[in-house]
Amino acid sequence: MLFPALANNPQKDPKIGLTERFSYGLGDFASQMLYTPTGTILIYYYTEYVNVNIAVVATIMLLSRLLDGVSDLFVGWLIENTKSPYGKARAWLLRMLIPFFIAMVAMFSVPPGLDDWLKYVYIFVSYNFAISVVYTAINLPYGSMTTSMTNDSYQRSILVIYRMLLATAGNTLTLVVTLPMVEFFGNDQAAWTITFVILAAVACTCFFLTFAFCHERIVTPPPEKSDLKTTIKVIGRLFKNKYWVMLTLAMLTTFTADVVFSTANTYYCRYFLDNPNHIGTFATIMNIFKVGCLILVLPIMLKKTGKRNSLMIACVIIIIAAMVRFIDPYSATVAFVGAAIWGFGQGFTYACVFAMLPDCVEYGEYIDHERHEGMVYSGASFGMKLAAGLGAVIASTVMQVGGYVNNAPEQTDAAMNTILLATTVFPAILFALCIVSVLGYRLDKIYPDVIRELQQRRTSSNAADASAQTDAQADSSRDQQAQS
């Protein structure tokens, strides 16, 4: 074992302290340094610096998301079958540090001078290595740790709030510094590589701190059977968990909406506001209001209205924010006001869906008598990454239909209209679909009963195990007496 002093400690105080909460949040700070660029500026890098077709790249991203279905399920299986002194999920944070660094740098290092078809091959390989392999293998275990760090619903909600706060910080930092750093280092393809060497080093340091200070208190043994047939049955049983299905659809729609907006918004900043660096201003405004909501409003809302209702309220707020831009699409002031409202709504959406996901693990155990946190998270993770592909395709297809031209000094009126639609109407439609997807979600109301039943089962199981052990000892004692 490389770090014996950092072995998992299941006996740690059940009350999660400030240091551990903050360290857990650092994992999403690190994740955002890879995930944010792929959903916001990666296509911009490909079109404006590598000079490839926007529609082809978006199609590559969507096809890649289909591969994620396999990688997510495989990593979910790995988590449930991991035996490590570092813990089931926690161990993967350490194992994937070096691959994470390589993946971040490679994705933004398309070699200059390649023929177009070689560029597309490189993009396909580097993008899938980064997202389908590395990001899945580190972020999926990281996310599933909330189910093993505590089974207290409120503590999980607080963990998720820290996660969202640090994710917001990572998102803001990445968007604020990336383009200025690229300009500082020469504003060419090599400058992108240098920029992401630095960001990758910061991200890996943060992941190591998450590994070092967070511990899994709920330890469950690997399943007795882990063959392909058993795994397929587990996947099939996932779809009997109706609340997991609803939540996965909600995650798919909200994440797709955000990617559509983020992808098109970089082009909006360049062609409507004449300043692509405004993307950092947008991130700052949105995330300031997002953090304000997370700290001041969300804890109260979760107690007063529940997670589902808070999520639905957030979707309505963001739909309103999207429509604000129509007041004057060329006004930075109007756009920034809309960003503030959008950011406030985001303070609800991400925190709510990530707080609801561990509850679905408990509900799955409640109805199935088996705990499968790895598989539950793998399905949700696939929905998130499918959203990244769908969002990129929707945004790029809309822009392509409008006649968008790479790196043009000006775009046609049709192209400008489609950029505007991709940052307003299309995200609003997707958030409306999220509301529809969770109309039947009732887990908030029955969750205390679910936990009570699970605790009774574990108490009965422990009592039965103790009785069996006592009987075995008695039988052994009688055998010894008979022999003597």
Image (tube, helix red, strand yellow):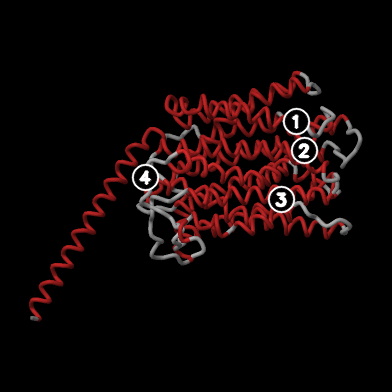
Q: How far apart are marks 3 and 1 (CA)?
A: 21 Å
Q: Distance between the residues labelled 3 and 2?
A: 16 Å
Q: What element carries label 2?
A: helix
Q: What element carries label 1?
A: helix
Q: Position of residue 404 (x, y in %)?
A: 85, 38
Q: Which amino acid does label 1 sit on?
A: Leu
Residue at the extreme front of the image, as rendered: 5
Q: What element carries label 3?
A: helix
Q: Mark 2 points at which residue?
A: 398
Q: What residue type is labelled 3?
A: Met
Q: Earlier in the sequence, mark 4 or mark 2?
A: 4
Q: Name the residue under label 1.
A: 421
Q: Distance between the residues labelled 3 and 4?
A: 43 Å
Q: Name the residue under label 4.
A: 13
Residue at the extreme bottom of the image, as rendered: 483
Is there any visible trace of residue 475 in the rendered image? Answer: yes
Q: Which of marks 2 and 1 is nearer the N terminus?
A: 2
Q: Position of residue 73 (x, y in %)?
A: 54, 57
Using a 10 Å C-alpha cutoff, classify the residue at mark 2 as few (fewer than 14 neighbours), some (14 to 19) or many (20 or more): many
**Where the C terminus falls, by quadrant?**
bottom left
Q: Do the residues labelled 4 and 2 touch (CB within 8 Å)?
A: no
Q: Name the residue under label 3.
A: 61
Q: Which of marks 1 and 4 is nearer the N terminus?
A: 4
User: Compared to 175, does 126 lie above or below?
Assistant: below
Q: Which of marks 3 and 4 is nearer the N terminus?
A: 4
Q: Which residue is drawn at 37% across and 37% down?
A: 447
Q: Position of residue 385 (x, y in %)?
A: 62, 48
Q: Earlier in the sequence, mark 3 or mark 2?
A: 3
